[in-house]
Amino acid sequence: MIGPTTLPLREIVPGVHVAPQLDAAAMTEAARIGFRAVVNNRPDFEHGPDQPTNASVAAAAEAAGLVYRFFPVDGRWQTPQQVEDFARLLGELPRPLLLFCRSGARSTRLFAAAQAVVGRG
């Protein structure tokens, strides 16, 4: 169960939430409210230099005791191989799990596509 927070979270299935772009400070909050793992689906510098870098978010996540993975994908299209790789990654990560990208939409779509792969298997 995830505790109260000001982070902009949306639960997509029990134990899995999505959020728009998060920064390093959000990792401490994510750990505090009960997340065990975080996946960043946004490539560095996707829309310019003002976005937090993977390195800064990863360091903060690890310092907060979170399992952190960088799985950057294009916001418009993910290859079948990326979807399969993401499905495998999801099976390895502890829950509750937090996925983020620019708006949360790409992470949501990627999660749904990965779940479809798992359902076929």
Image: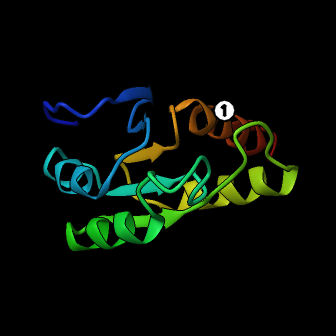
- Residue 87 or residue 109, whichever sits in front: 109
Query: What residue is at 57 percent from the left and 57 percent from the top?
Result: 45
Residue 15 lies, in percent from the top left, at: 38, 38
Query: What residue is at 60 percent from the left and 46 percent from the top?
Result: 47
Residue 83 lies, in percent from the top left, at: 76, 49
Name the amino acid type tagged 1: Arg
The answer to whether 42 appears left or right of 95 in the picture is: right
Q: Counting other residues with Cα less than 10 Å from the Cα at mark 1, is it few (<14), some (14-19), or many (20 or more)? A: some
The answer to whether 14 appears left or right of 108 in the picture is: left
Regarding mark 1 in the picture, which secondary structure is present there?
helix
Query: What residue is at 76 percent from the left and 36 percent from the top?
Result: 76
Residue 102 lies, in percent from the top left, at: 52, 39
Is 17 situated above or below 52? above
Q: In the rendered view, how is the structure colored?
A: rainbow
Is 4 situated above or below 32? above
Query: What residue is at 62 percent from the left and 51 percent from the top?
Result: 46
Q: Which residue is mark 1?
A: 109
